[in-house]
Amino acid sequence: MTPGPQTPATAWNYGDLLDALDAVFPGDAPALIHGDRVVSWSGFARRTNNLAAGLRERGARPDDKVAFYLRNDPAYMETLAACFKARLVHVNVNYRYLDEELWYILDNSDARFVVYSAEFADRVAGLRDRLPNVVAWIQVDPEGAAPVPEWAVAYESLADAGPGAPLGIERSPDDLLFIYTGGTTGMPKGVMWRAADVWGALGFGRNAPCNKNETPPDVATHVANAARHAGRNRQLTACPLMHGTGLLTAIGTLSAGGCIITLDGLRFDPEELFAAVEKHGATSAVIVGDAFAKPMLNCLEAQPGRFDLRSLKLIISSGVMWSLDVKRGLLKHHPDLLLADMFGSSEAVGFGSSVTSAKGESRTARFRIGDRCKVFTEDGREVEPGSGERGFIARTGPIPLGYYKDEKKTAETFRTIDGVRYSVPGDWCTVEADGTLTLLGRGSVCINTAGEKVYPEEVEEALKTHAAVEDALVVGVPDERWGQSVTAVVELAPDQALDEEALRQHVRSQLAGYKTPKRVVAVPQMFRAPNGKANYKAASAHARDALGIAAD
């Protein structure tokens, strides 16, 4: 695919920027913190240069794909930086994938190198023969406790071997970053981002040096000076780096000379998060909606005053609904926080934003529309503010090239409307009279009941305001009379029993009658991915099974 036109302000490459930062940034400043492990900026520069050189020595060439089969770990950001420096393409792999799912990603992405955690060695070993194009398997095991198979290379041997010098190669703004996204239907798709478009999409400000035709060394000097005067962002990435929210915010922080803090627990633990904030002086945290925020609030409610959170100034969320009541609860315990709810996707960044503080708040799912964004009806008309008409959100400007090896899906999502190319991932909303957006949800999970459209997130939000409900997903199941029947799957709060009629009446008191679930089923744990995103397919299958309904 042909990249869009370039200007000096967009001709950027993260490898060049990291080389420039390595040269000017204080060497003892932490770049990565994981539990008790700290990687200084000088160590980060040395190790990532060695990794980049080591991959090239093993045959890596520009545009080769590198699969990341890792949990949150310093190796993730180190390997990402090495890919930027060596002009290689990041491919994220969900660490919960089993054999066929894992094979699909590695095969579909044309992975030539696979960096995997030692805990997944047995699964990798079982697939090797089916992936003949992989030229190197690199095993991550910082403790060195697991044996390295004869067919693999020890990650630490690459990171530690060599002088740690910059590669000294010419890079391009067209170098790629892949973000594989499962979406809500079909097989995962690889979203192809140009390096320059990632830089532009992350919004480094119209007044940033990159928009004044300055070079990466100029920007690095600017970043270093700003860090000395204003301090550095220490971002605690609580959500997985393998998903867009964690990955893109980490890229933004690291490229601004910040520090990435990750948790070493296998499951999200709010106590671990708050202890890490206190220990490492985290200034910001990145989560994914109520799936993270509600346990955090429950922890603070159960142990008020236990943690010193004064360093924490900002919590960022994206990808999943973040309820107003939960935001209010967090602010009660830390009134100085800013809570930034960002509306975006792997296919586009900057659809909208909502900032809540002790001084002001926004309704759940209400966003201020991003510049370069519009809302269109299905027939391509722009939605009039205050009309109540539903439309899909679309963004132009720095957006991906499309989906890797999927021209059909690319044409469906990256559309040209009135001569302008937009990213249209399928999120529906209305535009209020004041120009703000009310997010309705992803069209692919919209429920059609007797001709009425029901967006699950709206009903889920109503359910979660009931004291008995810890979490909720809403799906449509086959119904002879209605076509689809609105059905709720709920995870109950501790010591609560399911009262189906009470929950139905609670929703009816807030929403139109046709949005009320016909049935409610309870589950011990909600169907969500590690990043908090809903698994509607699994929730629907469970609801049909629980209600004795055959699959449609």
Image (cartoon, rainbow, N blue to C red):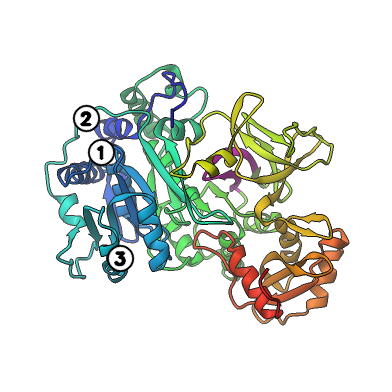
Identity of the residue drawn at 14% across and 65% down: 150
Q: Is residue 87 visible?
A: yes
Precedes in sequence: disc 3 or disc 2: 3
Magenta-colored span: 336-354
Q: Which residue is mark 2?
A: 169
Image depth: mark 3 or mark 2 in front: 3
Residues tagged 3 and 2 counted as in contact (Cβ below 8 A): no
* Residue 462 falls in image quadrant: bottom right
Q: Are marks 2 and 1 in contact (CB under 8 Å)?
A: yes
Query: Does label 2 or label 1 sit earlier along the sequence?
Result: 1
Nearer to the camera, 32 or 191: 191
Tally the marks. 3
Q: Secondary structure at mark 1?
A: helix
Residue 225 higher or lower than 315, as above or below: above
* Res. 436 image quadrant: top right
Q: Which residue is mark 3?
A: 127
**Mark 2 to mark 1: distance in Å?**
8 Å
Name the residue: 24% across, 63% down.
Answer: 141
Q: Mark 1 = which residue?
A: 86
For image coordinates 74% across by 31% down, the residue present is 382
Report the side of 471 relative to 179 (left or right): right
How many C-alpha atoms fall within 10 Å of the one at disc 2: few (<14), some, or many (≥20)?
A: few
